Image (tube, grey):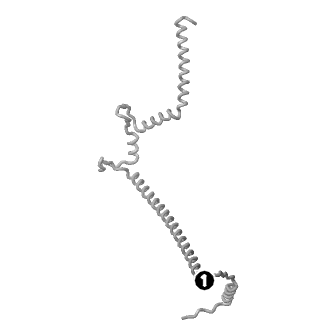
Amino acid sequence: MREPPEPTKAEYEDYERQEAAAATAATLRIEGITPQAVKHIVREAVERSISADYDFTDRVKDMVRKRVAEQVDKLVQEIGREQISDAVRSALADGWQETSHYGEPTGKRITLRERLNEAFTKKYRPDYGDRTESTTVEHAVRAAVAKALETEFAAELVQAKSAFRAQVDELLKGKLVASLKEALGLR
């Protein structure tokens, strides 16, 4: 076996300074404390330090666990988005297969354009007794216009109706007065 190398002069001087500092350091002596009590106090301090390290380690493990879970969730969402967008692109490119009520293929594949055209031009009958037939789009437009007239344009509609009534009343008054004057021979 090889012997360790001799310390350098700087290392030796550093060691001597440490020894001198330890020799001149203040020592606390308390009467009644035995060496066993000192050992017990030191042991408890070391155990507290170690348990604090364990708490720290557990906290670090929890933080790492949470971060890993976040990254896994993010990755799963990203993969899911990619797969869903691929499926949507495929469905839009290939179209839909017409099927029976049992899900069996029955006809040709329908493109998105054909599917939308079919949905928009489909005849719409709100209830059985209603004889007016219109397409789905026409019905939706009528419903939107009716709602706008009832809510957004209600005040303007009331004003327009009252102005129209006033004009009709003036016209009728004028015609009535002219007819009476003519009938009575008044000028």
Position of residue 99 relative to residue 134, above or below, is below
Position of residue 10 relative to residue 145, above or below, is below
Q: Residue lying furthest top in this view?
A: 185
Would you say 25 lies left or right of 70 here?
A: right
Residue located beneath label 1 in the image: 34
Q: What residue lies at 53% left-to-right and 29% top-to-bottom?
A: 157
Residue 109, given in percent of the width and then of the height, sits at: 34, 49
Position of residue 107 relative to residue 28, above or below, is above
Q: Nearer the viewer, residue 4 or 60?
A: 60
In the picture, the quarter occupied by the N terminus is bottom right
Residue 128, given in percent of the width and then of the height, sits at: 34, 33
Q: What residue lies at 48% left-to-right and 35% top-to-bottom?
A: 147
Q: Nearer the viewer, residue 126 or 123?
A: 126
Which amino acid is tagged 1? Thr
Residue 181, given in percent of the width and then of the height, sits at: 55, 8
Judged from the image, the secondary structure of the residue bearing numbered disc 1 is loop
Position of residue 161 relative to residue 92, above or below, is above
> How many badges with numbers are in the image?
1
In the picture, the quarter occupied by the C terminus is top right
Residue 174, given in percent of the width and then of the height, sits at: 55, 14
**Neighbour tally class for label 1: few under 14, some 14-19, many 20 plus, Cα within 10 Å:** few
Would you say 89 lies left or right of 182 here?
A: left
